[in-house]
Amino acid sequence: MQFSVVTYGTEGDTRPLVGLCCGLLDRGHGVQLFADRSTLSTAQAQGIPTFPLAGDMKATVGPGGALAKLMQDGSDVTRMSKAVAQIANDNTTSWMRDVAEQAHSADALLFSGITSYVGLSVAEHLHIPAIGLGLWPLSPTTAFPSPLLPPWKMPGWLNRLSHQAINALLWQLFRKGINAARHQLGQAPRKQMWRDYPILFGISRYLVPQPADWPDIWEICGAWSVESGSWVPPAPLAEFLSAGEPPVYVGFGSMGGFDKDRLLATVVKAINGRRALFFLGWSGIDPASLPDNFFVIGSTPHNWLFPRVSMVIHHGGAGTTHTASRAGVPSIVIPFTGDQFFWAKRLSLAGVAPDYVPHGKINLHDLSRMITFAERSDTVQRARALGQAMATENGVLYAAERIEKLLTDSK
């Protein structure tokens, strides 16, 4: 079978789908991935055919970009939704045109994130099945509130209502753009959001158990990741790792546009001379400003690296959260925006991370306390046990088999 996979966002939005694409390729299927051009290198290294979508996500999260304010203060869900909708609405017509042209021979269209309405519309236009791919649990449930809200403790009915309210808000913000693009493809305008379509979630059941009130078409599969295979580290990195105790990993992925000088000063002081690895990502931090106990790395497979570190200080993206947890090491989460607060709370509930502090409020006292928590023997033991449990999951294989079954059942 031939699959077109569509997403748009940062590295954290694209890389898990690359893992799923690899799984489909391994099972003899054809795959084509559509995403922001700055996030396609991992897919290309795996030999996956790619197509860059219009837009510039790296500029969007950088200074002056549409998401820059969110990188600075996190903002409320309404502002965040409007900023994300602006990105989609600016590009939806181009995305739909390109995907429709390139996916005409696909047997199914798989889609994720802010391209969801694009994926559903193009699949409808091409008369092929559509399957959602989720990296956070967006479908309504009584089990927990919407991941785009602060992780409050609420009664079940209010949890469900929060999902419905956020999804309705997103539809209202996206509807005008998606209907304008549908008109370009000769489709009638959509008056209501899509609801009852299958969604597979690249999430570990050890972090988010399958909600009991979800229908069978919504399923948590286990995390999706790209296998490091025979990856060999550069000699300087191998030498650094072998020269002493496992270091602290620090990296904030695709986050950018924040007060990097203040955050960096806090991190350096809290690390307090410990051996540390620092991933620059999209932060714009000058590596020359780091002290000698910090070793700067480029893009490195997390599933290879994280088992070799003592803890992971990160922003709480779904991919980093899952990889650190599966590696069996504690996390310290300093969230910026969106679902990162949800994942920070999940790790705290699992006992493998301290309670989070948002990046705009983190200070030396907080981060030092959080590092102490991550170093405690009971925290290390819980992290190791969680990693062993997650190692029993094969999210890529599970999702690939479910996709095949969904298409077989639809015929």
Image (spheres, rainbow, N blue to C red):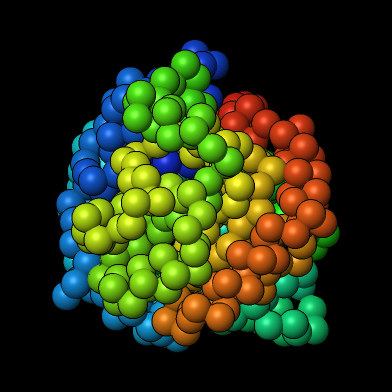
Quadrant of the frame with the C terminus: top right
- Location of residue 279 with respect to 356 vertically, above or below: above
Q: How far from the left and from the top, in percent, is residue 23?
A: 53, 25
Q: Quadrant of residue 221?
A: top right
Q: How far from the left and from the top, in percent, is residue 279?
A: 37, 49
Q: What residue is at 31 percent from the left and 41 percent from the top? A: 298
Q: Quadrant of residue 174?
A: bottom left
- Determine whether, in the image, residue 120 is placed left or right of residue 150: left
- Determine whether, in the image, residue 160 is placed left or right of residue 360: right
- Determine whether, in the image, residue 67 is placed left or right of residue 382: left
Looking at the image, how many numbered discs can be counted on the residues?
0
Determine if residue 369 is in view: yes
Determine if residue 85 is in view: no
Q: Which is more toward the observer, 224 or 178?
A: 224
Q: What residue is at 42 percent from the left and 73 percent from the top? A: 266
Q: What residue is at 43 percent from the left and 21 percent from the top? A: 231
- Location of residue 240 with respect to 13 vertically, above or below: above
- Determine whether, in the image, residue 281 is placed left or right of residue 384: left
- Location of residue 310 with respect to 255 vertically, above or below: above
